[in-house]
Amino acid sequence: MKTERNIAVAITGFGSIGRRIAQMLLARREAYRERYGADVRITGVCGSAAGLIDLAGLEPARLDDRERVAQGLTGETFLRQMDADVLIEAGPSDYRTGGASLLYLRGALERGMQAIAVSKGALVVDLRGLLRLADAHGGSLRLSAAAASGLPTVDFLRHSLAGCRVLSFEAVLTGTANLVLEEMMNGLGFGDAVALAQERGIAEPDPSFDVEGWDTAAKLVIIANAALGAGLRLDALPREGIRHVGADDVARWRSEGQSPRLVGFVERDDGGFRAGVELRTYGQDHPFAHLRGSMKGLTAVTDEMGPLTVIGGASDPRATAAAALKDFEHILAAR
Amino acid sequence: MKTERNIAVAITGFGSIGRRIAQMLLARREAYRERYGADVRITGVCGSAAGLIDLAGLEPARLDDRERVAQGLTGETFLRQMDADVLIEAGPSDYRTGGASLLYLRGALERGMQAIAVSKGALVVDLRGLLRLADAHGGSLRLSAAAASGLPTVDFLRHSLAGCRVLSFEAVLTGTANLVLEEMMNGLGFGDAVALAQERGIAEPDPSFDVEGWDTAAKLVIIANAALGAGLRLDALPREGIRHVGADDVARWRSEGQSPRLVGFVERDDGGFRAGVELRTYGQDHPFAHLRGSMKGLTAVTDEMGPLTVIGGASDPRATAAAALKDFEHILAAR
């Protein structure tokens, strides 16, 4: 049993995911104490307009205490006043500038903190710079929740496949696209399939980001850059969506026993990397052919261990919160 | 870049796997230097009757230098004279007593070393005692190569699924059994299917260990005990083999579209664990139905992320060596 250590956690971006992370983390305090000898507290949370800091630790009931929330306690002001070991960033994604997420992650890493990214925008914009900051100040940046959350990707490639050289990988990363393609193979038109995914709460009201391949592209950029140092850029990535899929495609795939999947891929190529988002089809002997509903999957080809595939990955807020807390456990285990 | 550290490695059990590990490790010295700032040397190797120690580091050509091998430099004598940070144990498995493997692992852990187990016997006999020794002396015990080698199992369950509670898992762990069942589904009788697996160099001359479920049982005990602390005992594990499979079974499974697999399973049950080795059948929508040849697979059911499956796992010495060196990279990354 290690000596008990105090671990203070701040959460920025306090929407539905941030709240769920906070609740799950507080519910696990006893487990952290037993397993890691760590006394874990949430010492600050903030949203886009207001925040709350309490160095003694915020209990579940007080996280939403409107009386105590301070207007303006956000952004740089929050960063200056908070005192935490770990920052969990769960704000909205801005894929153009990185937005407030990037400010929080940079601020945390400049202070030598351990950072956990949940949203993707800042990572797509400047993962390399953030990793450099982490190195320079002795902190770390973890990003399981931003890299397909419920599906192990970066830790699978880096930890489970350490000791191998990963030559390439391809991955089904967008639950919505998978579900829409599945329903189209069942006979629905594109519009009806999207409507069904929206009814089930899986597709967004505006599904463009998912069905045009942007979601897959963003996750691919994060995973390939974090796990392989591929240096991909979102705006330079060849990208295909699934809007153009028609009844004739569906008929042909069916007759050939093929299942269509929207995949992100990256391959080592002549000293560099070739990557993109493509609609590919898979025969029934390939694990991707059996990804039902919003399931995800990743197949890596390695030099020493051949091909390895991981599949699963619930697409819900609970899985995303659990992925962020996986990163948190890795931090506790490493200290 | 970290300051360069010297890392001395000893290898006990210097048969074909031990040699391959040594060659692969020496071929990666430059990579270890770049990635971890570590100057890695092999300072000693020993087999059952003789050994070789050179604190300056054994180069590839000298690993088999018969002139320099000292008879009797093995066992306790080797342990007393060697001076290493990491011990890799790759001797033969003794499932009854743990044999020399257990002596080497205990000796290394008592000296505070980091230990990597490749063979399974000692782990089946006394994993709990070895982990306790590692804890008491500040070392560690890693065992990827003994836990299905090319298929990530313990690190998948512990690292990739940290932040989840693993409720149960089932796993196809024995390449030979999988290949024999596959050939039987293709029309061969049991004897012919075993002969074919032997021709391909996958089944042992005496296939009993694999086809009677012992290999699956041993791996299950190691994985479940290391990843879940299940406390399983090999001699108390309900165990089924595949010898009894007949043409009528094959005909029935074919007509039902089911694929037979020999699996090890463990489930949390009333505060404890229920476990065993069973022949189970899977429909074509289950990833296990598509495990070809000697491929392996593991499906874990978690509370937060639902079911997750990993499949792959080349069954060859190269994959086993790579799995041992995965453990080695985890040690380098942690120091």
Image (cartoon, coloured by chain):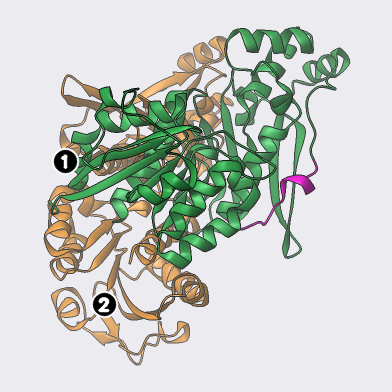
Chain colours: A green, B orange
User: For numbered disc 1, what is the local secondary structure?
Assistant: helix
- Of A91 and B23, the residue lying toward us: A91
- Of B163 and B266, the residue lying toward us: B163
Residue identified by numbered label 1: A34
- Of B248 and A95, the residue lying toward us: A95
Is A201 placed left or right of A3 in the picture? Answer: right
**In the rendered image of this protein, does residue B155 appear above or below residue B140?**
above
- Residue at image x 46%, y 15%? B249
Which range is magenta? A228-238
- Residue at image x 50%, y 61%? A133
Is A265 placed left or right of B64 in the picture? Answer: right
User: For numbered disc 2, what is the local secondary structure?
Assistant: loop
- Residue at image x 45%, y 36%? A72
Q: Answer yes or no: is residue B232 visible.
A: no
Q: Quadrant of residue B264?
A: top left
Disc 2/disc 1 C-alpha distance (Å): 32 Å
Identify the disc placed on residue A98: none
Q: Main secondary structure of the magenta part?
A: loop
Residue identified by numbered label 2: B84
Q: Answer yes or no: is residue B139 visible.
A: yes
- Residue at image x 42%, y 67%? B21
